[in-house]
Image (cartoon, coloured by chain):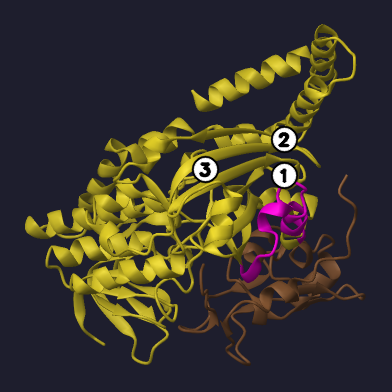
């Protein structure tokens, strides 16, 4: 078996990427935060987002920070039970700007 | 911007570029809208370019397209935790021009393709996100953008807006994607000196290697890993069905990190400098998950239409081909002075049905289901195969016949005789 390692820090990966952040205008929003906190027991977004944008707080709350978003669509599609993710593309020219893609 | 165009193309990836190029070249008044800073800045692919689809659009593309390496060797690895069993096909035939496929870097390739599109006469507007389709009852008559006064009109709108295909969903043309319809892939690009890559992969200048991987690296999920050699970089990534990520609650970048730490993979990347990390969804739902592809004043091309052959790792070629077919449909209708109604645009569907696009997608229509319901193909078999190789290759005084018996026993214990026969049947049915 491959030995267990320290948790991987996604921030170090995202640091290599180029972004133009649309400050104060997140392109993804949680529709109803209470649904995440009270009803959703699985909170897959906090595990499966490849940019680690969703964080599970100790009190059951889910916090979303879209600055590192890779615009893949995972969070919107995996939220099958509650459809609680309001997902748009960033304004033209904003968001991740791939150097290589 | 209250101008009217013959056609509006949304997106400047391979499908959108193919569509815009084909129509502009035929003299149509074409507007192409891209939300990125430049074409390619929002696009992610492995990436392998299959020459054929592009050749049919731009025959002389090799003259100035940014191509990394032509592929002369393909490896397939089946991995256990610390080992792999592999097959290799390498041929000097692949060194004969014109080359059949290349590694590419999409940000560069898409920019090049787009330049050709603009030279052909299409008007490209970047840094502009299309927010909605403008409808007149059930007919698409234009698009709304996030620019001030950003409504534009056209006889037909070609949706080349990628896997998420938000516009078609907002318009009610198709439903939200299911986690079982898409694979989530993450990848990194690692830079190394050209000579190091050539020495490491036993290749000469311009030559490239593809390694496809299956087995333990996906931690029981349905998916594959890949490694491609570019000119002075290596792309390494892994993609699995999103439904499996969801169900098993696996973190994609941790999966990639563990794959990179595999003792057979790590030395290939050693000393490289990681310069970008990307994630992307691949529409792998196949034929059964395809949406409606045309309607009153609109057509869908590329990833937005689920045009991906997951088995053969084909996508960008289908994107270009579907973009071209959609464009040729528009050209044909305009020449005949026919309106862009659903009944007339149905010709696009006909073109698809008659071509390899739909024939291939139909051929593998059961594949997603078969693999999905049978994860032994990604767990038990890789392990059994690796153990069998280990048993046979270890010289330890046990005779070979006994070793063979042990291997047979290990397969039967794990999958039972009926299980093995069933699996063989399922594979045969899926590929038939």
- CA gap between label 3 and label 2 equals 16 Å
* Residue A38 at x, y percent in the picture: 85, 70
To which quarter of the image does residue B33 belong? bottom left
Towards the viewer: B30 or B73: B73
Q: Is residue B187 magenta?
A: no
Residue to which mark 3 is pinned = B310
Residue B77 as seen in the image, left or right of residue A95: right
CB within 8 Å, label 3 to label 1: no
* Residue A12 at x, y percent in the picture: 74, 75
Residue to which mark 2 is pinned = B375
Q: Colour of chain B?
A: yellow
CB within 8 Å, label 2 to label 1: yes
Residue B95 as seen in the image, left or right of residue B286: left
* Residue B321 at x, y percent in the picture: 31, 50
Q: Chain of mark 3?
A: B
- Magenta range: B254-277
If you read the primary sequence from the N terminus, does the residue marked by circle 3 or circle 2 appear first? 3
Residue to which mark 1 is pinned = B221
If you read the primary sequence from the N terminus, does the residue marked by circle 2 or circle 1 appear first? 1
To which quarter of the image does residue B190 belong? bottom right
Q: Secondary structure at mark 1?
A: loop
In the rendered image, the vertical position of residue B253 relative to residue B86, given as above or below: below
Q: Residue at x 41, y 69 (%)?
A: B108
Q: Which chain is brown?
A: A
The quadrant of the image that shows the N terminus of chain B is bottom left
If you read the primary sequence from the N terminus, does the residue marked by circle 3 or circle 1 appear first? 1
Mark 3, other Cα within 10 Å: few <14 / some 14–19 / many ≥20: some
Q: Is residue B287 visible?
A: yes
Q: Is residue B271 magenta?
A: yes
In the rendered image, the vertical position of residue B96 relative to residue B57, given as above or below: above
């Amino acid at each position: 078996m491959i030995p267990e390692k320290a948790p991987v820090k996604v921030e170090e990966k995202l640091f290599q990427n180029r972004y133009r952040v649309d400050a104060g205008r997140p392109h993804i929003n949680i529709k109803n935060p209470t649904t995440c906190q009270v009803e959703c027991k699985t909170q897959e977004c906090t595990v499966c987002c490849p940019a680690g944008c969703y964080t599970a707080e100790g009190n059951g709350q889910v916090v979303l920070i879209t600055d590192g978003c890779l615009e893949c669509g995972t969070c919107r599609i995996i939220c099958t039970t509650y459809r609680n993710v309001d997902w748009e593309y960033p304004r033209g020219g904003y968001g991740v700007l791939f150097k290589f893609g | 911007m209250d101008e009217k165009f013959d056609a509006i193309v949304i997106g400047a990836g391979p499908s959108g570029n193919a569509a815009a190029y084909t129509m502009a070249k035929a003299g149509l008044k074409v507007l192409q809208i891209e939300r990125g800073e430049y074409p390619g800045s929002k696009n992610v692919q492995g990436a392998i370019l299959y020459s054929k689809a592009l050749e049919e659009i731009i025959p002389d593309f090799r003259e100035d397209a940014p191509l990394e390496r032509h592929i002369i060797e393909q490896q397939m690895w089946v991995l256990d935790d610390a080992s792999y069993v592999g097959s290799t096909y390498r041929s000097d035939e692949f060194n004969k021009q014109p080359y059949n496929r290349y590694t590419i870097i999409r940000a560069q390739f898409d920019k090049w393709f787009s330049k050709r599109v603009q030279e052909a006469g299409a008007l490209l507007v970047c840094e502009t996100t299309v927010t909605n389709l403008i409808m007149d009852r059930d007919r698409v008559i234009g698009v709304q953008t996030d620019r001030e006064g950003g409504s534009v009109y056209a006889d037909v709108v070609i949706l080349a807006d990628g896997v998420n295909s938000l516009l078609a969903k907002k318009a009610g043309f198709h439903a939200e994607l299911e986690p079982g319809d898409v694979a989530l892939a993450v990848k990194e690009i690692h830079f190394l000196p050209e000579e190091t890559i050539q020495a490491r992969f036993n290749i000469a200048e311009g030559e490239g290697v593809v390694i496809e991987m299956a087995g333990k690296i996906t931690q029981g999920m349905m998916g594959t890993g890949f490694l491609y050699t570019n000119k002075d970089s290596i792309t390494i990534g892994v993609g699995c069905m999103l439904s499996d990520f969801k169900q098993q609650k696996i973190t994609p970048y941790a999966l990639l990190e563990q794959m990179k730490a595999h003792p057979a993979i790590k030395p290939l990347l050693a000393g490289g400098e990681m310069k970008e990390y990307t994630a992307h969804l691949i529409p792998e739902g196949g034929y059964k998950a395809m949406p409606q592809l045309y309607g009153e004043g609109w057509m869908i091309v590329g990833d937005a239409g689920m045009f991906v052959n997951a088995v053969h790792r084909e996508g960008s070629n289908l994107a270009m081909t579907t973009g071209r077919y959609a464009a040729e449909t528009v050209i044909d209708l305009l020449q005949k002075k026919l309106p862009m109604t659903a009944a007339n645009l149905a010709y696009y569907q006909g073109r698809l049905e008659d071509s390899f696009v739909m024939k291939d997608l139909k051929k593998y229509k059961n594949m997603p289901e078969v693999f999905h319901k049978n994860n032994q193909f990604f767990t038990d078999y890789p392990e059994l195969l690796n153990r069998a190789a280990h048993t046979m290759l270890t010289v330890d005084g046990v005779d070979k016949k006994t070793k063979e018996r042990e291997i047979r026993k290990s397969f039967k214990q794990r999958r039972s005789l009926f299980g093995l026969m069933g699996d063989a049947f399922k594979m045969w049915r899926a590929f038939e």
